[in-house]
Amino acid sequence: MSSLSPKSPDQSEKSKKYDRQLRLWGDHGQAALEYAHVCLINATGLGSEILKSLVLAGVGAFTIVDGEKISDEDVGVNFFLDPDSIGQPRGEITTQLLLELNPDVRGDAIDESLDKLLTNNPDFFNNFSVIVATRLSEKEIITLSKKLWEADIPLIVCQSIGFIGSGRLQVQEHTVVESHPENQNPDLRLDCPFPSLKEYFDQIDLEAMEFKDHAHTPFVVILYKYLEKWKKLHNSSKGPSNFKEKASLRELIKSGIHRDEQGNPLAEENFEEAIRAVNYAISTSEIPQSIKDILNDGSCINLTGKSKPFWIIAKAIKDFVENEGNGYLPLRGTLPDMTADTAKYVAIQQLYRDQAAKDAEIVFRRVQQLLRQLNQPDDTITENEVRQFCKHASSISVIRGSSIADEYTFRNISQKIVTDLESPHNLMVYYVMLRGLDRFYSEYNTYPGVYNDQVEPDIVKMKACISRLISEWGCSSFSKDDFVHEICRYGGAELHSVSAFLGGAVSHEIIKLITKQYKPINNTFIYDAISAETATFTF
Amino acid sequence: MIKLFSLKQQKKDGEPTPRSGNQKKASAAQLRITKDINELNLPKTCNTEFPDPDDLLNFKVIICPDEGFYKGGKFTFSFKVGPNYPHEPPKVKCETPVYHPNIDLEGNVCLNILREDWKPVLTINSIVYGLQYLFLEPNPEDPLNKEAAEVLQTNRRLFECNVQKALRGGYVGSIFFERCMK
Amino acid sequence: MSNSSSSQGHDSSSHRWNHLKKVLERPGPFCHPEFECSPETLNFLMSSCKILVVGAGGLGCELLKNLAMMGFKHIHVIDMDTIDLSNLNRQFLFRQKDIGSSKAEVAAKFINARVPGCNVVPHFCKIQDFDSDFYRQFHIVVCGLDSIIARRWINGMLVSLLSYDDNEELDPSSIIPMIDGGTEGFKGSARVILPGMSACVDCTLDLYPPQVVYPLCTIASTPRLPEHCIEYVKVIQWPKENPFDASIDGDDPTHLNWIFEKASERATQYGILGVTYRLVQGVVKNIIPAVASTNAVVAAACATEVFKMATSCCKPLNNFMIFNDIDGIYTYLYEAEKNENCLACKPSSIPKYLKLTSNEMKLQELIQLLMDSPTFRMKNPGLAVNIEGKNRTLYMSTVPSIEVKTRENLKKKLSELDIHDGTKIMIADATTPNTIEIVLSIPTFMEMSNE
């Protein structure tokens, strides 16, 4: 078989197994995942659903911290337990059954409660990539939040109760180079062509072309030519900016379509494409505000010996923009497909590629200079990393998070809550309910409504908890009794399909944190399975 | 808002209800092609041939152009309608070897509505009209048979000559075409 | 039977299901208006409620787990596929040792072992292998499919099970809800279909984007992308050279290698970069990226809807949810609308009944009746019938080659054509926008003698 096709690439078993996800986050994303070690606190139904999608995807290792013994109820909600194991340590059994899913993954369990672990081994959490916790008490949340904020390790705190779920991400700073935006505009530079592109455009004479050539000229050429013509006609140095001006450019392009003997326009798909592209392809070279903000961020301007690669490359790009780039980002270097003959398309594509390579090389040299100034080793940042960064420069992203402990102890979040609660169908009401639940749990050491005969009295207690919270936040009154009733009726129950939804979503957030691809939530996610709605809030 | 299952009548015993019988529901593709075929409204230059009248999914269309380069020729196309019709177009191949810029020697046909521009509102009728148009207006800009396209573009006379040669049966360049006169 | 129900009774009272009992046995302000909280509901899930899961792949595995954990015990699963190595990154009921085995069988065995009391019945076959009697036994059908054809087929089947009374009022007990999930990469959707009542799969066919198709002339003469080179080899070069005397098998490495080589050659010739083995695989097999997390989310949303539907504990999703977690986590709900001209479910496509006096009637007379009858007033009806899964054209006047071959039938009696009481006839006519189906109602000998 191999003699038949000596050039055929040898696909490893691993790349076959992970094929469907490698097409999304690439081999480098997979490598990051395989290097990661995730810690789960409490192997609830939700907890094991979160780990399940990480284990399947091939995370390097996981550790479960759980001091509980398996109960009947646990078996009813956590698929990775079986009835024979009732009474045994919950974390250990869950670990065993999860490990069956993927022999590439390592996993272990600590049969100890979070409380004890924090006392006995306060640095336990320092070596994990991400910590995810379910069913914590208010006190545990605050302790853990402070600890991990200091250690600069991402934490996600999740809750699944009845039909309601929530996830809160705490991360000091998270930077993303590959955010994989959907529907991104192409980076064509038709308003500011680089020299080799301008030279290529200038030597083309559309009017002198035969029909076949004319109909196979890529739309970028057409758009550039008519843009120039439009500028001359309107005596303007900038291209069309408003609707009317764009419409007149479209008309101008239309007038260039070849006609038959009767004067009817011929079918020229490339001209149609140029007309459609007026909307998105002529004024996109300016740096987006979100990127300007990153380049002007304190972390970018004031590099130190401890600066992370992201910021060093960002600074090199800032310097590039201010010097060689003449105010523009390094060129992305890709050309979308368009009607054209092969030769013309490939020639233009090559121009974009070459220029992108040149830009990236300049940035790389600047990066090396910066590394030397910062006394960081030369190989801290590879040329390939810089190339990737330049390619994605217009869609990089930085998230600066907030600490959960601050959210729980400071009261300055009230305004947001009040405004959201005023609108009728806002999931913020569940945020308040879940905070009330945390408070209830820390006061009574149980969830409201656990026992059938206690539902009504617990509703009264729960209302009191929420009133106190509300007044701590400086809000006036809260009249959402239906929601209090609903939360109390759950009696702390966890529904498997609600946890499975949340578990899937949270595990992808963890993959985002680990691979540094795709933008994670910022920073609180609420799921209401009654209506199937979700919402994200920033605290 | 209906409540679907009243607990009192919760059992499903799987007894067939006598009224609705036990026939398989005809597929949407079958219903649609029956309609398409029954409503075929073709110009006199086009004909259909159903080798098996029970199988409306596989048939042939014969086109005998009465004007243009291909006047006097007779061209057979095979149509295969898949189970996802009309979400996906039928597969159409030209079974008659033809010297044509938009049809290659394997019978692949370059007609936009057969691929990228197919829409479920189009019918078998629209495809037949599209095929007929290809014989009236061969399009040299986006060719499948590059040699033929080149000739059509540079020397219409020679192209006409070549088409005639091929129709009568004979060589065009190194390629032999079977006679396909009406 | 009495044995199993008593053990189920015991099970539904064990602490294991306490979580479910809280939401099923206590009233709540957001429940369905007709929800009656009682232990009977959980008992119904465990003893009577029958669910069909279509597909045991990425969504199917998750659905089976979720349903089993939500208290459902009588679950059937159909899948014609066997397990492949590339399934293991998300189809979590399968292991390396299961490669090559039936997905449905392995999945069912796993669930039944992990969740004692749950009885998943596997069917290692095509959905088309079962008829309406099979599908009618379920309370709810939930689909985790990657094929539009299969979705449409199930949809059509469930629509065909609807029954209407003489006033054309839908009998609600004939409705089998269909919950349908779908994923692609980090995007997914879940929807609830009440056949005959809300938008069905065919009402919203536009929502399923057709596969990317490149123009043939681009592939043949102006390739620009690596994909164009691969498509060229697949569509034009392979049938021409027929290198292995077989059609392309996307799972055969020798086939893929050949395509990879030829596509690379073509790319080099045109100066196109980027033909890789992975891309070749992707294009040839039309691979849709898939991750465990999205499958988990979408299947969970579907299972929650099954639970709501079966218990009436909440109003079901009305009726479409879109999910996307590329940038944060985003969901969007909306109500897909019924298409009044839907081929599958519009009221006029619901079979009408036509009363005949006897099946001694000739086909010609039946056609005349369709043309004369004030209800139909047809012009040029073309008639076909589906007998035992095979299509038969009875008569079609408009297509000469068919007309010649079916003319004989005109003189035959309906009984000679295998047409009896209850036979469904497809009729296409210029007077209706779509083919309609008519069920013939012919009194049988028994009924006649009773009269």
Image (cartoon, grey):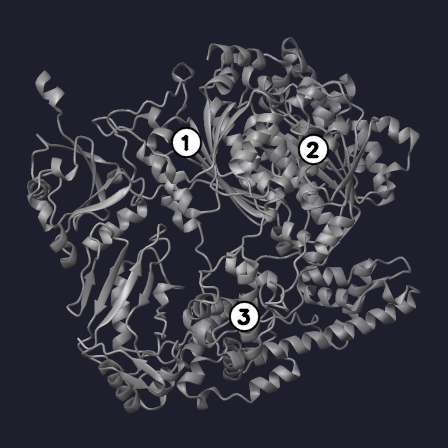
B54 relative position to A92: left or right: left
1 or 3: tag closer to the N-terminus = 1
**Residue A9 lies in what quarter of the image?**
bottom right
Of residue A500 and residue C77, the one placed in the foreground of this image is: C77
Q: Nearer the viewer, mark 3 or mark 2?
A: 3
Q: Is residue C75 left or right of residue A517?
A: left
Is A472 or B58 nearer to us in this picture?
B58
Q: Which residue is mark 3?
A: C263
Q: Nearer the viewer, mark 2 or mark 1?
A: 2
List the residue tagged with mark 2: A48
Provide the chain ID for the residue under circle 1: C
Vertical comparison of A409 with C287: above or below: above
**Residue A537, percent across and down?**
66, 41
Q: Is residue A251 above or below residue B159?
A: above
* Tag 2 and tag 1 share a subunit: no
Residue drawn at x 36%, y 61% as measured from the top left: B118
Residue that numbered label 1 is attached to: C177
Which image quarter holds the C terminus of chain C? Answer: top left
> Is residue A521 something one can see in this rendering?
no
Count of all numbered marks drawn on residues in the image = 3
